Image (cartoon, grey):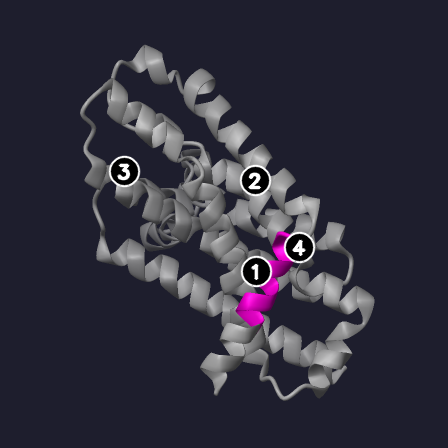
């Protein structure tokens, strides 16, 4: 029953993305930005290597702005328009709603990611890349997008203002990116014990994503990314229940 409810919400939400120009604008911005960073900032041709490391390198930073923009409307719009009260009267549980909305947004992000396939074709045309590594890079990129999306969805449930939801979502994602940056870790090393520094570094999405983009699949990285998504969705459900009760 819950699976059917989730599928219904998923189909409705995914279809709604393509009824407004906003989705197409976001996809075009993502494709233009990935191309610019890959070919110009990343020096794709100057590197002389048949791989997509310059393509994947900037994905977490691009997602920092684009994914919260996708997530901000998930619950803020329901609260602003008052339809969240209507949803509370429907025979649909909170978790199918949360999961259906998340999966639709995640598939939308996946479609945007897949539309970068011309870059993959280009590198195969120019050389002989390890396509297994590239597939792992795409998988890692999609998982990181899912993490950002689940965090952004939580923040969308906090505020009925989409701009506030976007800022909160981007700020939370930024913390998960910066926790692995050497500058941040150096500040912790000045006063914190080693286990705390390692703990802070383990929360960095960049660290886990870079491991996947190099073609390996560390169990700890896969477990961390999936656990983060699951935890954020659980918190999202609690927030939705709280708002519906209020």
Q: Is residue 207 left or right of residue 111?
A: left
Secondary structure type for disc 1: helix
First of labels 4, 3 by sequence position: 4
Q: How many marks?
A: 4
Q: Which residue is mark 1?
A: 14
Using the rendered view, name the quadrant where residue 15 is placed. bottom right
Ranked by sequence position, the earlier of labels 2 and 4 is 2
Magenta stretch in the rendered image? 9-18
The Cα atoms of the two marked residues, 2 and 3, are separated by 21 Å
Q: Position of residue 35 (x, y in %)?
A: 47, 25
| Residue annotated with mark 4 | 72
Instruction: Indicate which disc, 2 or 3, sits on the residue closer to the N terminus.
Output: 2
Query: Dots 2 and 4: beta carbons under 8 Å?
Result: no
What's the magenta bit mostly, secondary-structure-wise?
helix
Q: Which mark is residue 134?
A: 3
Looking at the image, can residue 159 be seen?
no
Q: CA distance from mark 2 to mark 4?
A: 16 Å
Which callout, 2 or 1, points at the residue further toward the start of the chain? 1
């Amino acid at each position: 029953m819950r699976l059917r409810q989730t599928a219904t919400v998923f189909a409705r939400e995914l279809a709604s993305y393509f009824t407004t120009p906003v989705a197409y604008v976001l996809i075009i911005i993502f494709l233009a930005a990935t191309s610019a960073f890959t070919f110009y900032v990343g020096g794709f041709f100057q590197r002389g290597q048949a791989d997509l490391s310059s393509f994947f390198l900037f994905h977490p930073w691009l997602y920092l702005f684009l994914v919260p923009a996708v997530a901000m409307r998930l619950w803020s719009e329901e609260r602003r328009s008052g339809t969240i009260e209507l949803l509370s009267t429907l025979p649909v549980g909170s978790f199918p709603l949360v999961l259906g909305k998340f999966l639709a947004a995640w598939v939308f992000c996946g479609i945007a990611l897949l539309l970068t396939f011309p870059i993959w074709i280009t590198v195969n045309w120019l050389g002989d890349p390890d396509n297994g590594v590239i597939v792992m890079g795409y998988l890692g990129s999609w998982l990181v997008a899912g993490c950002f999306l689940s965090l952004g969805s939580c923040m969308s449930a906090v505020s009925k203002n989409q701009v506030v939801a976007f800022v909160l979502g981007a700020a939370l994602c930024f913390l998960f990116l910066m926790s692995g940056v050497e500058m941040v870790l150096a500040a912790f090393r000045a006063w914190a014990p080693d286990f705390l520094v390692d703990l802070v570094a383990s929360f960095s999405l960049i660290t886990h994503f870079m491991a996947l983009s190099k073609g390996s699949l560390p169990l700890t990285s896969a477990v961390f990314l999936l656990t983060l998504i699951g935890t954020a969705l659980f918190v999202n459900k609690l927030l939705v229940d709280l708002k519906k009760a209020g």
